[in-house]
Image (cartoon, rainbow, N blue to C red):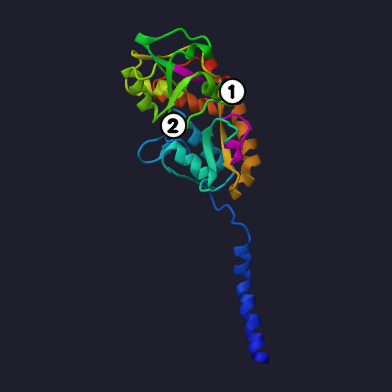
Amino acid sequence: MGLRFLSCCLMMASLAPSLLAAAEPAGCPKVVLSADPDYPPLHWYDGKELRGPSIELATRILSDLQIPYEVRYVGPWKRVLANAAAGKIDLVATLKIQPERERYLEFVRTPAFPNPVAVFVDRERAFIFNSWGDLAQHRGGISLGNTFGAEFAQYAASHLQLEEAGTADTNFRKLGLGRIDYFVVGLFTGESYLTRHKLGTRFMAMRPFLTEDKNYFAFTKASPCAKYHDAFEARLKELVANKTNIAMLGASLQGFDIKLDSTTLSRK
């Protein structure tokens, strides 16, 4: 009886550490980072890896903080958001703050990049645009998963004919065919598409911008890696203060042969 009892005690003692480890929440062995694969020149997938200043800035910060990381391509933008909501990725680089996203994302409140949103049109079918109201009599398009602020979303739902479909490529094709009259997308993304496809003489971004928007990093609330949020933001503030972010964005724009005035890049 005594030997059997002692044997049982020794077995339980050997199992105790593994049982405790199983009961504790998982740690953060590395930060899994992802982004929209179709949003150049901020971030894009080149067929092998995610690239762009959003990725470059995030990995610079994580490296500076000596935090292990993995840049992971998970598919289209909606799948990236679904993975974030499910806690399958830890950090999204970069996106706009939206109320629905704040349910599962903890945004780093220091803006990473300026990201003005523009109305693109076919030059031959351009129309007067001074305010959102000028869009009401026209058919518009946006890419799947894109949103441009709660105020514009509410206005669009009540006053605009705005179709959600595909990517920038899909919507510029629709614009060229006359199936929509305008396409709403980030200025940098729209301009990079036109440059890559040599369509700048056919399509153009109208002024004023639809919104003067910004892009932010966000940790997944369900992720144990969210504990790095404050340290990440502190380092981001330092890099924004010395305009490292703007230098990265400027280099990306130059790579796409996009020429924008310095005030557009440095808006805060």
Where in the figure is residue 3, as x and y percent of width and height?
65, 90
Q: Nearer the viewer, residue 229 or 247?
A: 229
At mark 2, the secondary structure is loop
Instruction: Tell me the quadrant of the picture where the C terminus can be found.
Output: top right
Q: Which residues are magenta?
A: 101-119
The kind of residue on which mark 1 rests is Glu
Residue at horizontal 48 percent and vertical 31 percent from the top: 53
Labels 2 & 1 near each other (Cβ < 8 A)? no
**Residue placed under numbered mark 1 in the picture:** 151
For the view shown, which residue lies furthest in the bottom direction? 1
- Horizontal side of 49 relative to 238 (left or right) equals left
Mark 1, other Cα within 10 Å: few <14 / some 14–19 / many ≥20: few
Residue 60 colored magenta? no
Q: Nearer the viewer, residue 165 or 69?
A: 165
Quarter of the image where one finds residue 229 = top right
Is residue 221 depicted above or below 254 in this figure? below
The kind of residue on which mark 2 rests is Leu
Q: Earlier in the sequence, mark 2 or mark 1?
A: 2
Mark 2, other Cα within 10 Å: few <14 / some 14–19 / many ≥20: some
Residue 113 colored magenta? yes
**Residue placed under numbered mark 2 in the picture:** 144
